Amino acid sequence: MLSVALLLQITFYKNSHIMNTELLGVIGIFILTIVLAIPLGKYIAKVYLGDKTLLDPIFNPIEKLIFKISGINSAEEMNWKQHLKALLSINTVWFFLCFFVLLFQGSLPLNPDNNPSMTPDLAFNTAISFIVNCNLQHYSGESGVSYLSQIVLMFLQFVSAGIGMAAAAMIFTAMKERTTEKLGNFYNYFIKSCTRILLPLSAIVAVALVFSGTPMTFEGKDAITTLQGDHVEVSRGPAAAFIAIKHIGTNGGGFFGANSAHPLENPTYFTNGVELWAQMIIPFAMIFALGFYLNKRKLSNIIFGVMTVGFLLLVVPTVMSEINGNPAIEKMGIAQTTGAMEGKEVRFGPAISGFWSIATTVISTGSVNSMHDSSMPMSGTMQLLSMMVNAFYGGCGVGILNYYIFIILAVFISGLMVGRTPEFLGKKIEAREVKIAAFIAILHPLLILAGTALASYFAAYDTAMGYWFSGNATGWLNNPGNHGFSEMLYEYTSSAANNGSGFEGLGDNNPFWNITTGIVLLLSRFIPIIGPLAIAGLLADKKYIPESAGTLKTDTSIFGIMTFAVIAIIAALSFFPALALGPLAEFFTLK
Amino acid sequence: MKNLFSIIKLTVATLILFAVIYPLAIYGIAQIAPNQGKGETISVNGKVVGYQKNGQKFDKSNYFWGRPSAVDYNAAGSAGSNKGPSNADYLVLVQKRIDTLLLVHPYLKKSDIPSDMVTASGSGLDPNISPQGALIQVKRIAKERKLDETKIKSLVESKINTAVVGPETVNVLELNVALDALR
């Protein structure tokens, strides 16, 4: 609340009229999401515990039928390795399904606009980015995919979110106070996440969108003559269903090229609120679900508190700098009463566009309602930092996995500091778990910085790229200087955080970017799932030690601060030099 | 192998639920939505002149203009300029837009021009401008159309959309359709 008051205070200083209506919208949406996330969290916990819910009569028969068709026994208990095996094999099947649909979409049905088939490197990148819940999208929806492909991609938006949630559900089970190898059934968690959580929420959002003007039609482009007499074609499509799961599943892939800045994808201030709510609700609720599931409300409240503090620290400078506008344009003497408007839509304005840009990067949605490439340098810094930290709220299910790694590290470090055996929820954290956690924590900066270094090397020497890119390497930049560096840094950061937003000026549809980011996407999705699952599985199998006077308490604010410090140190130390070369340098040149 | 076969069958079953039943259900509901979910249109004398949500190009001097667009209002695509805030070429472009506005509206002071009129939107299809963006054009339109300035000003004011939350907007197409109806 304090930071909200601070936000009001600071922004009131300049462009005060924006405060009344626009900031009210931001605060309203944020509070509404938190309030609704608590009952949803309770419901999610019930779903994973197998308790009775109101929706049982609808979904019990559907799930029964699905399992009957596939011949899977959803009651069979699995250990963590079996969970992993199931998870990885089903993702492999989906990759090939999607890859071949995209590769041949030009000759497949449901293609009224006659869009061409994808090149193999673009199909590779697109298929991967949708199975890993990233949706990097090196194509534009209007001209790059057929309606059939859109529907297959929409399918992946459901199931990839379901995979993240199923992984989180296994970790919930493993955290229970007991010693066991049996951690529930992967397919059971997966299907229930999709049917009982993602599907009903998506249906509600889709209906809200359809009645607000988002199209849901299988007709192709419409040709019209405008009021002043120009001939234009207007792209449409089955968008509402797609956009709903795009946000509910924290996927972020747009139906249209401009994503949620597009007037059909996000027609009004109301739909903007709905889409913001939709992308935040499950990540918020999953944290509360953990508390209800383990009956440790205090633990989940502390986790939520730490994440919220981190989130607000990123939001406040962003919203402020967007409302205050571009200093370089201010010097030209015009009125920036509506803030920084390059890349923004009038119906949203700078306040909620700035807020969205942090929500979408913190939560790994990656949908945009303004163009991040044109954001103010301080906002760009915060957007990058959100993805570099990648542990505040986070994506559907995987958010909690990322935070889990930092809990393990914080337990270990604080255990050493106070001279107690590091324990988390009655299980001893030993060398093996810490090694895995450290490896996962280091992997993220490694992939981002190595990728950026490689691309910057080529750009710095303006290398002729041959097969990899038509022309010399600087040709893929849309902006010179520090901002150009930021474009490359953003692309790898977005890939490694499985986010999917971009500094979209970057020329990324070519073998170099399609293949390198594709590899980063794969590694940074599955290794950070394998790691936490392994740690949780190993811990679950250990002897349960009841809490005693010697136990380091993990549900206290002190431990919350400790976790925050670990996150801040890892993110700040690894990424500060890169940020200084990119958006921070631009910030100081613009002053 | 049996496992792989199960996974493929599971994929098919979930495809039917999420990629066929779900979109068809939403498609069914869309049939009672505005214009059956095909996108709301605006017609003049029974002829469709545009989509209500999509911005369209207005560059004739007797119409209110919308914002600069990176795709020139081609609604078969969409994009922002993606220009960074410190990009020198971009800043020159903004300066040029300011100069053009001042040239065709000689009565304006620089500080009257709102930033949305000289910056490209995120989608390239922004249907709206700020109320100030419309008001600065009133005098020009009045002169072009030989109409009373106060009449046009009150037309603009009647077309300002306000809400409890969110910015004030003016839909350029709706404003221009109403302008054409003005005698």
Image: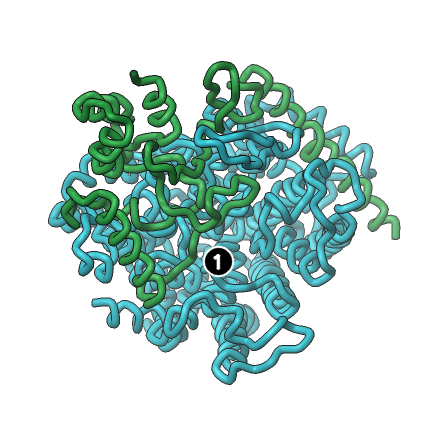
Chain colours: A cyan, B green
Instruction: Give me the residue at 65% from left, 26% from top.
Output: A59
Q: x, y percentage for residue A450? A: 52, 77
- Which quadrant does the N terminus of chain A fall into? top left
User: Is A132 left, or right, of B158 in this rendering?
Assistant: right
Image quarter of residue A239: top right
Along the viewing direction, whichever of A232 and A282 lies nearer the viewer: A232
Mark 1, secondary structure of its residue: loop
- Tag 1, which chain? A
Residue A245 vertical position relative to residue B41 in the rendered view, above or below: below
Along the viewing direction, whichever of A544 and B150 lies nearer the viewer: B150
Q: Is residue A167 visible?
A: yes
Instruction: Give me the residue at 19% from left, 23% from top.
Output: B148
Instruction: Give me the residue at 25% from left, 22% from top.
Output: B155
Along the viewing direction, whichever of A309 and A207 lies nearer the viewer: A207
Please identify the residue farthest to the bottom as the structure is shown: A461
Q: x, y percentage for residue A409? A: 44, 68
Please identify the residue farthest to the right as the structure is shown: B1
Residue B98 vertical position relative to residue A68 in the rendered view, above or below: below
Along the viewing direction, whichever of A140 and A300 lies nearer the viewer: A140
Total tally of numbered discs in the picture: 1
Q: x, y percentage for residue A10? A: 15, 51
Q: x, y percentage for residue A328? A: 23, 62
User: Is A559 left, or right, of A130 in this rendering?
Assistant: left
Disc 1 designates what residue? A504
Q: Is residue A538 visible?
A: no
Residue A19 vertical position relative to residue B171 in the rendered view, above or below: below
User: Is B152 left, or right, of A46 in this rendering?
Assistant: left
Instruction: Give me the residue at 32% from left, 71% from top.
Output: A418
- Which quadrant does the C terminus of chain A fall into? bottom left
Residue A50 vertical position relative to residue A128 in the rendered view, above or below: above
Image quarter of residue A29: top left
